[in-house]
Image: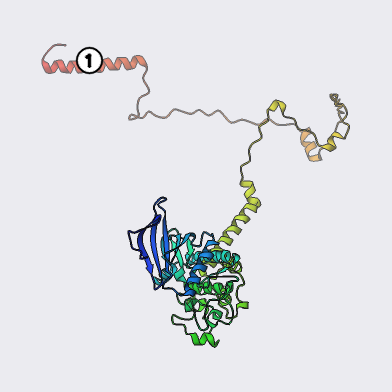
Amino acid sequence: MDFHVGQTFGEYSIVAILGAGAMERLFKVEHCLTKRTEAMKVLAAELATDTQIKRFEREMRALARLSHPHIAGLHHAVHSEKQLILFMEFIDGRTLESMLGAGRFPIDTGIEYIKQLLSALGYAHQQGVVHRDVTPANVIVTTSGDVKLTDFGLSKAFGDPLLTNCGEVLGSLPYLAPEQVKGVTSPDRRSDLYSVGAILYEHLTGQKPFGANRRLAPVLTDSEPEPQPPSKLDPSLPPKWDPIIRRALARNPEHRYQSAQEFLDAVVRLDEAPVSQLPLPQGRTMGIGVAIIGGLVLALVASPSLKSLRPVAPIIVPTQRLHIAPPDFATSIAVPEMTPPRPKRVVRVATAIVIEPPPAIAALRTAPIAPIPLPARAVIAPPPADPEAPDAPETAPERKKNFWSKLNVFKKKKNADSGEKP
């Protein structure tokens, strides 16, 4: 059956084509009743090999047993007209491969994606499912920043028979663990963790751990060199990322992280390290500054001089109720009853003290005292009158008489000038 856009298949209407391959095609469909958008994956069984059909059925069973917020969920599966059809969760977002190809993005953002990816793999491993194809192309980041692990076409549950033929390499070579390339052992959950380590390395450094064109021969012969530590490629990265990458990309599976939870715990511990432990200069400076300010505040609070500056609320006690209790030692001593003191009698004894004067003074005391003649009384004559000196102050009648006499003179003069008689 050939599907095309606008066609209705069962309860679904095909909206768009999302991808197409030799045997598989991916469509965007909408449920006619619920109007929910889903993804429809179709395998042309008449053109596929038995191995491809078994892998497709294995993917159905793997998705059917998984239900996790970071794994694309399976809604329904049908077998119609020699075609196997999966109806899965539709994810609106970008693949991590396209994001890494567009350039490096913030380190913290990528670390959050790695945490979600490890959480999804840890859950899948607990359910007995190994993905075996963990690559940036199979990791979709939604518009809200959630990671969705997709494409379990190469997944293998514990106990499933091995479908890979001798010499057949499945998956993306830059992210494949050495045991997957060699085929000497059955891939397990540590193979998925190796792939996550390769993705983390590419996010931190902007380069694939073994270059864009990895060769099979060095992997098969164990002559492939170890990838350079991330801090050597980018000095701004903390060196503590180096041991995490080295352990995640260990050639021997026994030397890697043995579980997704162990890998996740190591990333969380490093990502949530205190600022003072980070080797970045700004982190050290910030930590030292905070420590100095905190020490100064504590010293100021503990200083005795600060206590004297603190306002003390006054104690308001009514004066009529104010009572100060005496100290303990005062209450233990018997105080006699206080009586008013009697007035003291002062007895004065008069004694005569006779001091004999010297002979010279005694002779003067007995000699008669002659009167001292006083000088004649001096008569002070008044100074001669000064013609220019001002006259003595006039009395009130004299001032009045002079005033009218002067006024009459003015009247006489006026009459004389006018020819009138006074």
**From what the image shows, is residue 411 above or below residue 16?**
above
Q: Position of residue 254 (x, y in %)?
A: 63, 77
Residue at 59% across, 31% down: 375
Residue at 38% across, 61% down: 28
Q: Is residue 173 visible?
A: yes
Please tell me whether mark 1 sits on a helix, a strand or a loop.
helix
Q: Is residue 236 visible?
A: no
Q: Nearer the viewer, residue 50 or 340?
A: 50
Q: Position of residue 293 (x, y in %)?
A: 57, 59
Residue at 53% across, 76% down: 163
The image quarter in which residue 271 lies: bottom right
Amino acid type at circle 1 is: Asn
The image quarter in which residue 128 lies: bottom right
Query: In the picture, which quadrant includes the N terminus?
Result: bottom left
Q: Position of residue 63 (x, y in %)?
A: 52, 63
Which residue is identified by label 1?
408
Q: Nearer the viewer, residue 421 or 100?
A: 100
Label 1 Cα crowd, 10 Å radius (few <14 / some 14-19 / many 20+): few
Query: In the picture, which quadrant includes the C terminus?
Result: top left
Q: Position of residue 228 (x, y in %)?
A: 51, 81
Q: Residue furthest front?
A: 81
Left or right, 66 with respect to 83, comes to right
Left or right, 83 with respect to 159, comes to left
Q: Nearer the viewer, residue 311 or 351?
A: 311
Residue at 53% across, 86% down: 220
**From what the image shows, is residue 241 above or below residue 303?**
below
